[in-house]
Image (spheres, grey):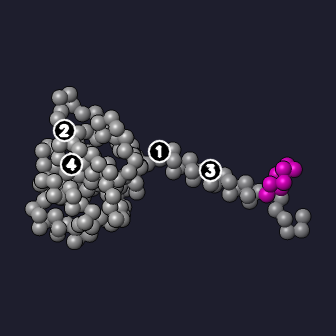
Amino acid sequence: MSGEIANCEGLGVPVKFLLFLLTLLFICVFVFSGCSNETTFTPAAGSKGPAITGYSFGKMTIDGKTHTTEIQIFPGGNVQKWSPQDPHYIVPSDIEEIVNSGIDTLIIGTGDVGNAAVPEETLQFLKSRSINVRVLNSHKAMELFNSSLKEKLGAVFHLNC
């Protein structure tokens, strides 16, 4: 075996390659098996407005429908796909539509572990429109959304990191 890696039981498979495959398998299982936190919520009987009943990395369930893209929730419960320029850096143009919908409070969910940034210019934009803002990771933002009155409430959610 001049410089070769030992093979496994005559299969002709180098040990380093097997270790690579096992490492890759471990990463895939860790990432895709729900290793992120899952938050669930059961709305009280007779509660009004939409309820976010589940959130985990990459998906959010609102009133029984599961969403896998960035979303925005308008007053009245209308849920739409949200398409920020860069979901990791939320600028005023990303939230203009929901700001113009008559909200007085905006909840911004910044992802599973809160990696989406909300720069000062965005906060100043909201302040100039007299809109209260709460910036939280998407688990905490979900909890706040569910416990809030929905009449003039809007929310945007980054669903991944």
Determine the CA span between mark 4 and mark 2. Answer: 11 Å
Q: Which residue is mark 2?
A: 49
Q: Which residue is mark 3?
A: 25
At x 16% / y 64%, what residue is drawn? 126
Q: Which amino acid lies under the numbered mark 2 shown in the image of this protein? A: Gly
User: Reading the chain from its start, which is encountered first: label 2 or label 1?
Assistant: 1
The crowd level at tag 2 (other Cα within 10 Å; few <14, some 14-19, many 20+) is some
Rendered-image quadrant of the N terminus:
bottom right
Q: Name the front one of labels 2 and 1.
A: 2
Rendered image quadrant of residue 12: bottom right
Instruction: Decide whether residue 13 is among the magenta residues.
Output: yes
Q: Which residue is mark 1?
A: 34
User: Reading the chain from its start, which is encountered first: label 3 or label 2?
Assistant: 3
User: Reading the chain from its start, which is encountered first: label 1 or label 4?
Assistant: 1
Residue 42 as seen in the image, left or right of residue 29 = left
The crowd level at tag 4 (other Cα within 10 Å; few <14, some 14-19, many 20+) is many
Q: Name the front one of labels 4 and 2.
A: 4
Determine the CA span between mark 2 and mark 1. Answer: 28 Å
- Badge 2 marks a residue whose secondary structure is loop
Q: Which amino acid lies under the numbered mark 1 shown in the image of this protein? A: Gly
- Badge 1 marks a residue whose secondary structure is loop
**Of 77 and 8, the residue lying toward us:** 77
Tell me if I can see residue 40 in this picture: no
Pointers 4 and 3 in contact (CB under 8 A)? Answer: no
Q: Which amino acid lies under the numbered mark 4 shown in the image of this protein? A: Phe
Determine the CA span between mark 4 and mark 3. Answer: 40 Å
Q: Which amino acid lies under the numbered mark 3 shown in the image of this protein? A: Leu
**Of 132 and 128, the residue lying toward us:** 128
